[in-house]
Amino acid sequence: MDNQALAKEIIHHVGGEDNVQSLVHCATRLRFTLQDPSKPNKDKLENTEGIITVKESGGQFQVVIGNTVPEVYQAIGAISNILEDDKKTTDASTNESKGNIVGRVVDVISSIFAPLLGVMAGAGILKGLLLIADNLNWLDPAGSTYTILYAASDSLFYFLPLLLAVTTARKFGANVFTALTVAGALVYPTIVELEAQDAAIDFFGIPVVMMPYSSTVIPIILSVIMMSYVEKLSNRYIHQSVKNFLTPLISLVVMVPITLIVFGPIGVSIGNGIADALLAGFNFSPLLAGAALGAGWQLFVIFGVHWGLVPVFINNIAVYGQDGIKPAATASVFAQTGAAFGVFLKTKNKKLKALSGSATVTALFGITEPAVYGVTLRLKKPFIAGIIGGAVGGAIIGYGGTQAFASGAPGLLTLPIFYGPGGEGFFALILGITASFIISAVLTYMLGFDDPVEETVEEANTAIKDDNIESVDEQIFSPLEGEAIALTNVADPTFASEAMGQGIAIKPQTGRVVSPVNGTISVAFKTKHAIGIVSENGAELLIHVGIDTVQLDGQYFTSHIQQGDVVNIGDVLVAFDINKIKEAGYDVTTPIIVTNSNQYSTVDATAENQVKEKDSILTLVAKD
């Protein structure tokens, strides 16, 4: 299907031109904001030639196309008025005023917490290991070694308001350092002492109800959101010559007292109220509540609403020292892992077997997107088997009273966070996740699924000849210096599922991208974060610097190429500021994908952990 025909199909199946508020694209996806999210025909789109998959996230309807997305985007502009500036301006203001409140809330929460999940998991694992060491008398809690390690594990949670101030400020465009200062005031030693004194406190006669703010979530988020509007208002009316210091002054004088008087007590009360309501469900029937969460957690993840529970988990650990809700969600993770393993055992399709096998491994460590999006959800019956297995495992865990004592994404490495004093409830967790895995795997194997028919070698060769494609053995060299990781470990389900093609990913240590082949620049994105290259031998490559970095709109990137440029191995293509991109909250892991992988019998990635520019990272083996 040509690009214009595909563009017509997409417009029709997203509900027509009138249903599109705005459209942008990144390196692989068309990102629609729609008037009515119920109108798109997702099944039709996913079964349309030229579309890899469809995903709804953060209030956006995302159509994943691949390397030709710029051409399809332009084709949409050529046959419709969707890309006109006046339409986008009008619709953007409309969307701001009415919008999908659930999508907007989910987008806000995910943007605030997502950058912290990695370090939160690491700190949680360390805290869990220290709990085990204490219970087994391996370390003396009064000793200096334990104290130092505990400080390393607990500092993130104690100073959580400061970290949330940074991510919230970035999300709402507020001054990060002013937000940090407001958050610092909440945990300032004299403020902490005032709360501990339990005495009458006032601010110019206004009563102040003091609360403990270390490890809190909601107060600082509310405070920084309001501060962003105070800053905008101040900057509008204060002269440029003095606004750089007057605006922060006004923000501090206004926001610190308001936070302590209003947002602090309200935020703490809201967090405790939500937590108490959910805990009441577990107190009423831990078995039923555990079963419901074990069955539904991955459904929450698919729709993005699981982010709404993340602050609850953190709040429970901060207030009560433990959380009884999160453990049941762990059953859901291991259930989908088991379902993916069942697919691995049953499928006769070599590509699906490889995908489900790698997805099983990554899911065991808490990264379920490749398993869910790439395997179980696509095949439907395995996903249902995972829901059933998750319900059984969640019921066992809920009934056993398992608690989480630190934060971290559920997976094998984070199991120590569920090991509390005396190990109470830990056996129920092990039994629950084991039951979830086994039941889901067995049900998947027994129920079966529509196993994709594998193309024979003769059919593949015929198709290649018909398309005049000639595949040859080829080496792809590293465009970056850094740590090489499997593509399936990338924190983006579309890349990790290998739906875009096979390849490798690199966590860069230097801020530049060089050409991995002798070839031609096929796509030079205006946002500079991604490059398409076709090698002299026909390999089509996509280099995507970072995850979701399209949202930076070219900031911190410098391009040295244009579309159509002929490049040689080692030529500099793009320079980027690693530190600035990380500070903006983005993962700089860079996938290097062979988008025409189906034209090769094998795409072998290097086994080296560290690579330098121009090291061999991929070997492409031609089909016979």
Image: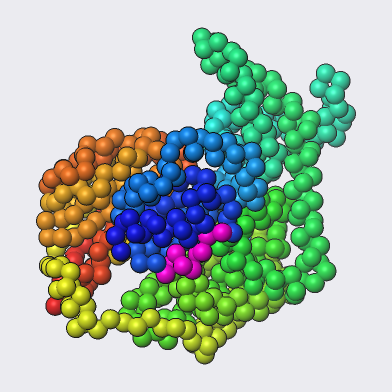
Which color scheme did the rendering employ for the protein?
rainbow
Residue lying at 59% horizontally and 24% vertically, measured from the top left = 232
Residue lying at 47% horizontally and 77% vertically, measured from the top left = 379
- Please check the rendered image and state whether residue 43 is part of the magenta-colored stretch, yes or no: yes
Of residues 568 and 401, the one drawn nearer to the viewer in this rendering: 568
Reply above or below: 427 against 180.
below
Reply above or below: 616 against 74.
below
- Please check the rendered image and state whether residue 189 is part of the magenta-colored stretch, yes or no: no
Any part of residue 443 in sight: yes
The spot of residue 130 in percent (x, y) is 59, 58
Residue lying at 57% horizontally and 19% vertically, measured from the top left = 235
Residue lying at 83% horizontally and 18% vertically, measured from the top left = 204
The image quarter containing residue 313 is bottom right
Reply above or below: 90 against 423.
above
The image quarter containing residue 467 is bottom left
- Span shown in magenta: 39-47
Check the picture and name the quadrant holding the C terminus.
bottom left
Q: Residue furthest bottom?
A: 446
Check the picture and name the quadrant holding the N terminus.
bottom left
The spot of residue 406 in percent (x, y) is 62, 56
Of residues 360 and 413, the one drawn nearer to the viewer in this rendering: 360
| Residue 401 left/right relative to 569 | right
Any part of residue 590 in sight: no
| Residue 379 left/right relative to 100 | left
Give the number of marks. Answer: 0
The spot of residue 438 in percent (x, y) is 55, 83
| Residue 460 left/right relative to 312 | left
The spot of residue 72 in percent (x, y) is 34, 53
